[in-house]
Each structure stands twice: as C-alpha cells, then as structure tokens.
Image: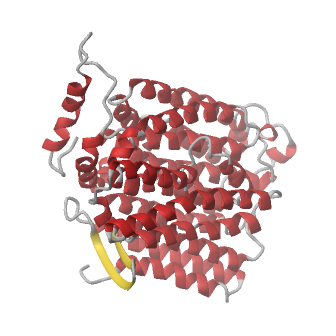
Amino acid sequence: MDGFPILSVMLAVPAIAAIACLFLSADGARWTALGATFVDLALGILLWLNYDIGGAQWQFAEQGIRLGFFSWDLGIDGFALMLIMLSVFLMPICIGASWRSVTKRVPEYMAAFLLTEVLMIGTFAAQDLFLFYLFFEAGLIPMYLIIGIWGGANRIYASYKFFLYTLLGSLLMLVAMLYMAGTAGTSSIPALQAYDFPAGVQTWLWLAFFASFAVKMPMWPVHTWLPDAHVQAPTAGSVILAGVLLKLGGYGFLRFSLPMFPEASGQLTWLIFGLSAVAVIYTSLVALVQADMKKLIAYSSVAHMAIVTIGLFAFNRQGIEGAMIMMLSHGLVSGALFLCVGVIYDRLHTREIARYGGLSINMPRYAILFLFFTMASIGLPGTSGFVAEFLALMGTYQVSTWTALLCTTSIILGAAYMLYLYRRIAYGEIPSDEVRAMPDLSRRELWLMAPIAAVVLWMGVYPESFLAPMRKDVAVLLQRIDRAAPISDSRPTAGNPAAAAAHGAVHAPEHESTPGEAH
C-alpha cells in the first residue's frame, strides 16, 4: 500500500457523503450514509490486514499542507489502529439503528453522523498537536446537534451541559499545547513524545491536559454530563457516545499525558487511583438504584472507564494492555446494551424499568442477546470484559494493592446492578398487554446485534488478535515512562522495607523482552 493515502481517503469518504446527504431525500440519505460507512469499514479492514505487527512504530504516514506550527500529518500506531477499527465497525450499526427510529430531518441527521466519523478517525490518526486539537474539539459539534435536535424532551439542557463541560475542560489544554509547541519548537506528536519537559513544568502541563481528558472519559466528579446526555440522545447517539467518544479521554492519556509528562504522571498517580476507586464504588451504587435503563448503563460506563484509568497509570504491560482491551470491550458491550434499550423503547416508548417484565416469554431472541451482553459487561470468562478487567486489575495490583482491592468491587457491584436489571426486564410476569404484544427482534435488529456479539466473543476467546498490533507500542511506551513509575506498596517478604528494590524487580523483565514476545 505504499503511496496510497488510505487515512486521508477514510476521512474523505464520509466527509463527501455527508455533503451529499444534505441534497438527498430521506431514503437517499440513509442509503448514502450506510454505503459510506461500509466503505470506511472495508478500508479499515484493509488497514488492519496491511498493518506490519512489530514493524515501524508509525505506519501509513502522510504529510500535507503546513501553516506555521500546524501541519496535515497523519499516521497510526497499534493503539490508533484498534480505536479506528472500533469507530468504523460501530458506524454502520449506528446508521442501521436509526433506519426506522429517526424520521425528521433525516438528511441532516445522517450528515451529522458521517461528520462524527470523520472527526473520530481524524483524532486517532492525527500526528500534529493542533490537528489533533481541531479534530478532538470539533467532535463536540455534531454530537451536540444530534442530542439537541433529535434527542428527548430535555435535549436542550443535556446538549448544552455536554457542550459546556467538554469545551471548558479543553481550553486549558489548548494553552498547554501552545506552550509546548513554542518550547519544543515543533508540534509533531512523535517528536513531542521524545522531548523532555522540565519536571516542574510537566505538572502544570499534565493538569491542563487532565482537565480535558477527565471530562471526556468521564472521571468522577466531572461525570455528571454523561447520564443526561445518554438519556436524551437517540439510540445511535448513545451507541457512538459510549462506544467511541468516551475513549477519546483514554486515548489522550495514552498519547499525551503518559509519554510527554512521565514524571508528572508518576507523581500524580495517587490522584488517578483515588478518583477511579471512588468512581467504581460510587457510580456502581448509583446505577443500582436507577429506574431508567439508559441512566443505569450510563453510570456503569463511568465505573468501567475507571478501570481504564487505573490500568493506564499502572505503568506496566498488563495494566496498559488491559486498559486498551477495556476501551475496546466497553465500546462494543455498552453500545450493544444501548441498542438493547433502543429496541424495546421503539416498541413501548419508555425507558422505565418498572414498565417491563417477562420479555423472555414473548421476545426470546432478544432475551438471549441481552443476557449475553449483560454477562460481557459483568466480565464473564470467555467474553471481552473478563480479559479487560483481569489484565487491568492484575497490572494495578502490582502497583497499589489497595486500589486493586477497591476497584475489584466493580465485579461484585457490576453483577448486582446488571443482573438486577436483567431480572426485572426479562423475567417475572408480563405487566401489561402492551408488553405482551411486543414482537421479538426483527431481521434488521438481529443483524445489528449479532456482529457485536461475535466480536465480543472473539475478543474473549482469542484476545491475541487485538493485543498483537499494540504490543510493540506498549513496549515503546514503557521504555519512556518506566523511569517515573510509582513505587509499589507491596512487600516481597515480611518486614522487608526495600520496596524500591521490589519495584525494580517487577519492572526489570519489561526491558529484557522483545516487542513481539508474548506475555
């Protein structure tokens, strides 16, 4: 594929289709959007098949116009590849989920979703600091419109809250970026990842980026915009918001905070661990008492993303790999759960849990798929959720036994609220004739959920397919950040105060392994 600008083409296809949708009828816009997302999915598969595992860190590099510090530089590593694949995989499903449920201003709706795809792929592929910021922040606009125009009764409040939270958090990041480009003399992300900022400055830069990424994740206590956004967003909006847009914060930590500010990351690990532990316990308990299905799944997303943050800041291979698998797994499973909510909402037009019951009687196919995704969310062995939680918690345990202990409660609490939800929806007596009359999954709905179920199972049974492209990038990142890794609180023997020695022993094998070696 030498010389073929595949990343630019993946950006151009949905961008051109978005413009075309504005001049088409509703049905024409639907088919154009579906076709464009399938083309990007095919290009994404081609990208994955041609990715050289163990090769150069940055592949499919493209360089275009340059304006001062700003330049059109694209390229991907294993981390970006996996998140781009998640994006292009979910987009056709989002278009299919909107096929019948969205009936007003359909061309504009499809154009907004295609624009969202452009900005997501651009964020993951950007290799220039300001190009990343452009894509990262512009992603607010189509999602703001999707919630504000096609959302529920309180859509205006939810869309403004979503926009203001995420925009205000990013202003500090822009100031930090301007300082970094001026100090280092470049806005190239690969170059900045190798640049050593003074330790004192790193703390302020880290906090500026944290203000943006913590909101995007979202981390407790700046998570309050998420339940409102999910509840008011249309089904496909919730799928792409939970599936991909929440991953922008985790990707930011991985791409900027850790490699560019390693000393600050090590010194402030306690902050990440503390906020994440609170998020896991608090939001899980809040989820347990929700009466709205979407709110329950939204709060569970905050708890799951907390597992991502502790894994990333564990400063070891298992934690980082677990965090990445959790981002992919959560994107698939939470997206599927929102689809499950959308299926029955389209029939009964309510998300109130108490209105449902006994769906396993008249909707058996729906009940089976809903149960599968419920188990994947809990972390059942054989599903992607198990691999993600096991790796992330194992990596965290090597650094902080207390954080690992507190966050492991997510397994118990997650089982509590998800099984409680499933029991109330699928079992018991059918509460009304309206529920009894609800038909089972249509062929279209089955085709929307079945591919997600297949990938969740694939990731759970053979996670190496997803870990292999990222393994060298994990090794490169560890070489950069290992010097700043926090000292473990574990003790190899009773009464032995040599925590630092134990810490060094834990990390020593990382330097001896080869990038392609299995761990």
Nearer to the camera, 27 or 104: 104
Which residue is more in the foreground, 173 or 213? 173
Most extreme residue toward the bottom is 23
| Residue 6 horizontal/vertical position (percent) | 36, 78
Q: Position of residue 151 (x, y in %)?
A: 75, 62
* Residue at screen point 33% across, 35% down: 486
**Quadrant of the rendering where the C terminus is positioned:** top left
Res 328 seen here: no
Residue 73, image x, y percentages: 36, 76
Residue 359 in which image quadrant: top right
The quadrant in which the N terminus is found is: bottom left
User: Eyeballing the image, is 171 above or below 1?
Assistant: above
Horizontal and vertical percent position of residue 292? 75, 42
Q: Could you tell me which residue is drawn at 38 percent across and 33 percent down?
A: 396
- Colouring style: secondary structure
Name the foreground residue: 225 vs 393: 225
Q: Is residue 380 left or right of residue 439?
A: left
Q: Is residue 174 above or below residue 343?
A: below
Q: Nearer the viewer, residue 450 or 278?
A: 278
In the rendered image, the vertical position of residue 184 relative to residue 518, given as above or below:
below
Horizontal placement of 55 versus 287: left or right?
Answer: left
- Asked if one can make out residue 29 in the rendered structure from this viewpoint, the answer is yes
**Which residue is drawn at the image coordinates 72% and 61% (left, top)?**
159
